[in-house]
């Protein structure tokens, strides 16, 4: 299978290594790279003999890939995906694939017109732990996502779009919900998919401790018809670490590590994960093989993301609640992991817990899903 990677640097290196692994197994061949900067060879990702382009349309015409992996900055993904679909290529698009319901509808239409498929880079959906967790907890009415990381000030200057709300005339997708903990939110939506029905009401609290335009700390609750709800409480401004967990009925899914536990005193189980590119290759060979993270599965996430991007700017956390990270590099919110754990346990928004720096949530009813519009 002929594979091209657009955006081969940064996280694109992970995809190049995946192609190289599949090439060693005789399943794929890297036929082109396209990006603003030339890609250099790295361990597990050679570039010798691979044509490199700065223009995607030229690459598509000359390389004729069967599959295009898109790892560009978020605001460039939809346009690249439309061009690749028109060229007849199946797609693996980094998450989020699109920024709005309009882009979702455009890409969905393009896939149908050209008879191609799109996988979105929510790789945790390929974990056997998710299936085992879902089977064990059954039909849920409530689930919660918790996560606490540390990102220093330098993290938000690593690229021109990092920490930004807009770049020129483009909406930028960054922040604790849209970027760092998007996998956790998607996991929560996946386990509640059977019961989370329109109308969907979002209550959103966004905060920042860094000098950025998006949230580094957030709490949200998405509630569907009949009261089924997902709560997420996350931060990248913590001096204590919680990789990311989905919590429901006493069960926990540590989605980044493919581990799950049923019941408070249960044993942790570790499972395997189906790589997204492998799955896309299988799907291209036989369309009866379902995609792990097909575009259609991400529609509710896209609607949620669109509402977050349109929400009021994040509230700055007052300086009296901040202190230097022990390793330097910026400020953390004092006791924020305790706040997150309390929110998930309750479950409740930060403001409902009476957290001193919290403010009343922004509330919005999400526009209807594409199939019901």
Image (cartoon, rainbow, N blue to C red):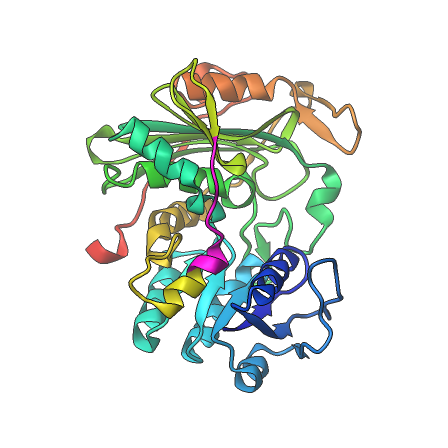
Residue 167 screen position, x and y as percent: 61, 58
Above or below — where is 300 with respect to 337?
Answer: below
Span highlighted in magenta in the image:
270-279
Above or below — where is 294 with respect to 175?
Answer: below
Residue 166 screen position, x and y as percent: 57, 55
Above or below — where is 104 with respect to 324?
Answer: below
Instruction: Let me know if residue 339 is in the magenta part.
Output: no
Kindly identify the residue that appears in the image at 44 percent across and 80 percent down: 87
Question: Is 284 or 235 nearer to us in this picture?
Answer: 284
Residue 328 screen position, x and y as percent: 80, 29
Kindly identify the residue that appears in the image at 55 percent across and 69 percent down: 26
Kindly identify the residue that appears in the image at 68 percent across and 70 percent down: 36
Residue 76 screen position, x and y as percent: 54, 65
Q: Note whether residue 149 is visible.
A: yes
Above or below — where is 223 with respect to 261?
Answer: below
Q: Note whether residue 97 is visible.
A: no
């Amino acid at each position: 299978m002929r594979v091209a990677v657009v955006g081969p640097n940064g996280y694109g290196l992970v995809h190049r290594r995946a192609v190289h692994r599949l090439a060693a197994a005789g399943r794929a061949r890297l036929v082109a790279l396209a990006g603003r900067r030339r890609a250099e060879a790295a361990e597990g990702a050679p570039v010798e003999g691979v044509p490199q382009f700065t223009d995607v349309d030229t690459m598509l015409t000359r390389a004729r890939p069967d599959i295009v992996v898109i790892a560009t900055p978020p605001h460039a993904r939809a346009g690249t995906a439309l061009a690749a679909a028109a060229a007849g290529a199946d797609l693996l698009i980094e998450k989020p694939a699109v920024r709005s319901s309009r882009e979702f509808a455009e890409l969905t239409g393009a896939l149908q017109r050209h008879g191609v498929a799109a996988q979105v880079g929510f790789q945790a959906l390929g974990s056997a732990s998710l299936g085992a967790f879902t089977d064990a907890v059954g039909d849920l009415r409530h689930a919660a996502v918790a996560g606490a990381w540390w990102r220093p000030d330098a993290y938000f200057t690593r690229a021109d779009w990092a920490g930004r709300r807009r770049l020129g005339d483009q909406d930028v997708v960054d922040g604790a919900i849209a970027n760092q903990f998007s996998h956790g939110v998607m996991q929560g939506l996946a386990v509640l998919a059977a019961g989370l029905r329109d109308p969907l009401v979002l209550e959103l609290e966004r905060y920042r401790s860094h000098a950025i335009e998006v949230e580094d700390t957030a709490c949200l609750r998405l509630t569907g018809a009949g009261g089924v709800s997902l709560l997420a409480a996350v931060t990248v401004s913590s001096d204590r670490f919680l990789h990311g967990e989905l919590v429901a009925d006493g069960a926990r899914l540590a989605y980044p590590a493919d581990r799950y536990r049923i019941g408070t005193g249960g044993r942790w189980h570790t499972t395997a994960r189906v790589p997204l590119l492998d799955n896309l290759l299988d799907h291209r060979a036989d369309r009866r093989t379902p995609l792990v993270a097909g575009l259609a599965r991400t529609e509710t996430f896209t609607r949620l993301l669109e509402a977050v991007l349109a929400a009021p700017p994040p509230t700055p956390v007052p300086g009296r609640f901040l202190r230097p990270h022990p390793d330097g590099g910026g400020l953390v919110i004092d006791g924020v992991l305790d706040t997150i754990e309390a929110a998930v346990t309750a479950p409740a928004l930060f403001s409902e817990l009476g957290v001193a720096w919290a403010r009343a949530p922004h509330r919005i009813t999400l526009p209807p899903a594409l199939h019901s519009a």
